[in-house]
Image: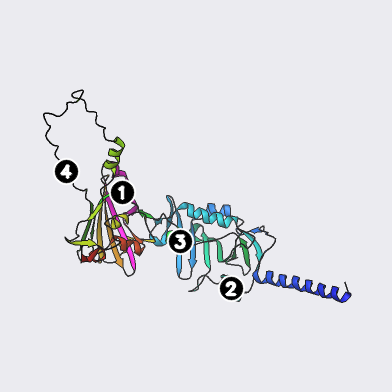
């Protein structure tokens, strides 16, 4: 190898190393996988003991989780219960987070990693304030942009800073503090499978009524047996029937299978639209979840309301009120039951009493169908 060729190869190798270093710097990849540093909240165990509330803020939104004798509640939703395991999960995240890499000290650069002032109107940063006695903050953390796989495969990081410190950090962990109410509560509102429902009545605003009920088909008429002929052979053992009995399992299946739903207001000579079935509305009461919640006393005047009555095979009756308010749909309910359904009805009413739940609009639309949505204009 000539000296000139050796020098050229050496320069090429050096250029490759420089390029790799620049790429690594540009993307901020941590190749070592190092995830050990100083704790984000070193005194967290004591903070958890002393805390009375957790306040979350982002722009003009705020959500306060308050610690009560009976559990955690949401201040901005008139004390609606929050799930304690959700609060616990946030504390665990913060307790396990460690400050790994120092980042910018320049407030003008905070926005790049979403650590700007969280009170700004369009802020992407989120502030987590842990409050103690007299609502005094005992910890104040700003959470910023996430950096996925920052410390290797499956090891994400989050940019953070303490509210009283200009220093920003890349911390270990996927830290999250959502401000949506639905992320902090038990979302279940009502869950009744269509198989348990026997009848549904919907009265839309304006008085239009739609009824869906199970209607068993008419019993089949057994054809008359011909008269026995005098010449017919007599059975070998009078009084004993050797005919094959019905399969008891088949009889049980027939007796337990619910009758199909029928749309009772379907006019004679008309049919349902293609793709529409009479059980579509009864099926819509399965898995209804809330997106938000508010006190009934906080609602406007009662107008534009649809009422729904659901009857089940175990004796429960659930009455719903569905209110359209702009593009939002709000639901309230009461329930009564007898025998097997009494306990379920009581629990359902106690949870829902005094509250109105915002549910997805598509779910509300599935419940409050109109006749024009169901009936084909063409003759059957």
* Residue 205 shows in the view: no
Give the mark nearer the N terminus: 3 vs 4: 3
Work out whether mark 2 precedes mark 1 in sequence or the reverse, and give the earlier one: 2
Residue bearing mark 1: 195
Please rate how many residues cluster around mark 4, counting C-alpha atoms within 10 Å: few if below 14, some from 14 to 19, many from 20.
few
Which residues lie in the magenta part?
326-354
Crowding at mark 3 (Cα within 10 Å: few <14, some 14-19, many 20+): many
Residue 211 in which image quadrant: bottom left
Closer to viewer: mark 4 or mark 2? 4
Mark yes or no: residue 329 visible.
yes
Circle 1 crowding by C-alpha within 10 Å: few under 14, some 14–19, many from 20: some
The stretch drawn in magenta includes residue 350:
yes
**Residue ID for mark 4:** 221
- Circle nearer the N terminus (4, 2): 2
Q: Secondary structure at mark 1?
A: helix
Q: Nearer the viewer, residue 343 or 274?
A: 274
Mark 1 or 3: the one toward you: 1
> Marks 1/3: CA distance?
40 Å
> Is tag 4's residue or tag 1's residue first in the polypeptide sequence?
1
Q: Who's the residue at 70% across and 60% down the image?
A: 32
Tell which tag, 2 or 3, sits nearer the viewer.
Answer: 2
Q: Quadrant of residue 185?
A: bottom left
**Which residue is under mark 2?**
112
Q: Which image quarter holds the N terminus? A: bottom right
32 sits left or right of 83 in the view: right
| Residue indicated by mark 3 | 64
């Amino acid at each position: 190898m000539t000296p000139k060729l050796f020098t050229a190869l050496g320069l090429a190798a050096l250029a490759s190393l420089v390029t790799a270093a620049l790429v690594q710097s540009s993307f901020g990849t941590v190749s070592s996988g190092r995830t050990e540093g100083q704790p984000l909240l070193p005194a967290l165990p004591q903070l958890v003991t002393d805390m009375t509330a957790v306040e979350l803020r982002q722009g003009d939104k705020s959500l306060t989780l308050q610690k009560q004798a009976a559990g955690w509640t949401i201040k901005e939703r008139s004390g609606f219960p929050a799930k304690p395991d959700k609060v616990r999960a946030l504390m665990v995240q913060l307790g396990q987070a460690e400050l790994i890499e120092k980042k910018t000290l320049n407030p003008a650069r905070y926005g790049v990693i979403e650590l700007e002032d969280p009170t700004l109107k369009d802020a992407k940063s989120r502030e987590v304030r842990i409050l103690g006695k007299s609502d005094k903050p005992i910890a104040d953390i700003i959470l910023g942009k996430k950096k996925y796989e920052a410390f290797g495969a499956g090891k994400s990081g989050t940019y953070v800073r303490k509210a009283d410190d200009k220093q920003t950090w890349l911390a270990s962990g996927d830290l999250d503090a959502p401000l949506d109410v639905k992320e902090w509560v038990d979302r279940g509102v009502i869950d009744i499978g269509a198989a348990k429902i026997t009848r549904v009545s919907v009265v839309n605003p304006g008085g239009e009524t739609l009824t869906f009920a199970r209607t068993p088909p008419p019993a089949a008429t057994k054809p008359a047996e011909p008269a026995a002929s005098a010449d017919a052979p007599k059975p070998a053992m009078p009084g004993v029937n050797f005919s094959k009995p019905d399969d008891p399992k088949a009889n049980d299946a027939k007796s337990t299978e619910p009758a199909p739903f029928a749309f009772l207001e379907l006019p004679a000579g008309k049919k349902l639209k293609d793709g529409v079935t009479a059980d579509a509305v009864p099926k819509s009461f399965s898995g209804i979840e809330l997106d938000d919640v508010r006190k009934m006393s906080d609602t406007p005047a009662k107008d534009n309301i649809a009422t729904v009555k659901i009857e089940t095979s175990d004796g429960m009756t659930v009455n719903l009120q569905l209110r359209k308010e702009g593009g939002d749909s709000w639901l309230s309910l009461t329930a009564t039951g007898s025998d097997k359904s009494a306990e379920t009805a009581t629990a359902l009413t106690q949870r829902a009493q005094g509250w109105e739940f915002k549910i997805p609009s598509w779910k509300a639309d599935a419940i409050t169908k109109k006749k024009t949505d169901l009936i084909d204009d063409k003759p059957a």
